Image: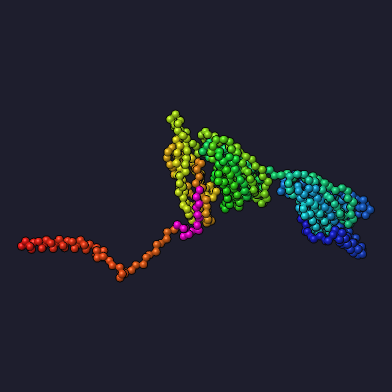
Amino acid sequence: MGDTVERSNGRTGRRRRYRLVFVVIGIFVFAGGAVVPVGGAHAANTAVDATDTANTTVDVDISTPGSIEAGTTANATVVASGAENGISTYEVTVAVTDASVATLDDAEVHSPSDGDGPIADIEPAADGSALTVTVALLDSTHDPADEIELFDVAVTGQAGGETALEVTEVRDLSDLDVDEYELGQRGETAVTVVDPEQTLAVSGPAQLDEGDSANATVSITGADDGISAYELTLAVNDSDRATLGNVSVHAEGEDGPMVTTDRSADGSSVTVTAALLDAVHEPSAETDLIDVTITGREAGAVELAVTDVSDVTSLDHRQYDVSTRTLVVDVTGRSGGGGFQLPEPADTSDSSDDEPAAFELGPVDSPDESTVGENVSVAVPIENVGGEDGTVNVSVSLDGTVYDVTGVAVASGTTETTVVDVTIPDLPGEYQLVVRAAADESTTVLTAVDDRTDRTDAKSTPETEPTDSTTDEDESTPAGDSLPGFGAIAALGAVLATVVLHRRRET
């Protein structure tokens, strides 16, 4: 694009300056007896009759950029046809009839490669509805030609729809001798802007048994500029029939993505926010974003859908317009393939009167306090109070982030304890630890501290009572207490003395 200069205060002043420059040069040339036209070497061989020039008609047309997508930019070219005496200056305005569909953002001036280039002023309207280009080509003139390309206009699609792109005004269109052409027609063309077709799809199992778990995948199609960030919510319409659990994010890169997940308390929805950093998704026809665990609870059909899309951003930080689709999952009472399965009773005739497996969550054993970044163990006891053996899914989450989902087989009338390792977040504070098994749920608060010395349950060293080597004069100590064993010795002495006295009496 040529150099841009500031416009003068008013178009009339600018045109007068152009004419003044050429008049002064003309006076100098004719006064010196030189026979060098203003157009330089290109114009030396062109004989121009002022009368003929006045009758020369030039059409100014604009080409169509075709169909463009909202958020993208394409060029339309302004062309002068019939300028048989060349072009040295012009001032042309182009506009769109509906700036909500497309806007005009910039222009690039065409000029011959020889010469010092044009003096150009490009002035877009504040709302992007119009753009005016003023050019003085000086020694870089357009030679005579059937069709001369003047400049390209950058057209940016804003929203789906139709708009017209047209040349609305031509204030100056001069030949090599600075004589103005007569204007024939001003061109107009249609512009079609189409909305992007990025679509989020949810794929996964069409059928899921009670107690079984499987992954559902959220993918995007039409992300032709790649993906660097997104925030979306996946939900089921009936959490009694199925719930959502663990989330796995697809991304590659050394630094990995920055991800936060927020799972609802009843397991009906999970929101994933990801900034992929250098782990970006490159342009692809279809890109997998996340996997989410779905667990069947009760028989019946359930819908799994992307219910909210707050942000899906391309590699150049332009936000996509996204539509979504749903997945229907049929949760059945039959045992099927995949996931965690409920075993059938060995002998249905003997167990016909037995109640099915029923699970109760026992007291969860977990620390009340731990150091940030540490791994702690959470012991979860599960009792089967039903009449049949069965398998139950156990989930452990910390502040909505699910750390583990597993199946635990528990025989009828027994208790099994499963241990789950949980990583304490790096920030100190209080975190809600939630353990779920079947219909039971246990919620406790786990406090994360900066280091182990901050724990409130740390053992303190008992203070040592001062000792006194001497006995208080006001306190008396019994003799028996001060001389342990003295009573026994005294008794023995008394017995011996009695025996000796008795013998003497006999003698």
Extreme residue toward the top, this view: 349
In this rendering, is residue 348 above or below 274?
above
| Residue sitting nearer the eye, 337 or 371 | 371
Residue 377 image point, x, y percent: 46, 50
Could you say which is closer to the camera, residue 152 or residue 316? Answer: 316
Query: Left or right: 473 with respect to 352?
Result: left
In this picture, residue 362 sits left or right of residue 129? left
Query: What residue lies at 47% left-to-right and 40% top-to-bottom?
Result: 359
Q: Identify the residue shown where x is 18% and y is 61%.
A: 491
Which image quadrant: the N terminus?
Answer: bottom right
Counting the numbered discs, the total is: 0
Determine the residue positioned at 83% across, 58% down: 136
Q: Where is residue 157 in the image (x, y as percent from the top left)?
A: 74, 48
Residue 381 in sight in this render: yes
250 lies left or right of 107: left
Rendering coords of residue 134 (x, y %): 82, 56
| Whether residue 43 can be seen here | no
- Quick one: 39 or 205, which is closer to the camera? 205
Image quarter where the C terminus lies is bottom left
What percent of the width, then of the height, locates residue 398?
52, 49
Q: What's the coloring here? A: rainbow
Quadrant of res 330: top right
Nearer to us in this view, 280 or 257: 257
Q: State which region is magenta.
A: 443-457
Q: Identify which residue is drawn at 53% across, 36% down.
A: 209
Pick out the residue farthest to the right: 51
Instruction: Spot the residue most to the left.
Output: 507
* 282 is within the stretch colored magenta: no
Q: Assess whether residue 447 is covered by the magenta stretch.
A: yes
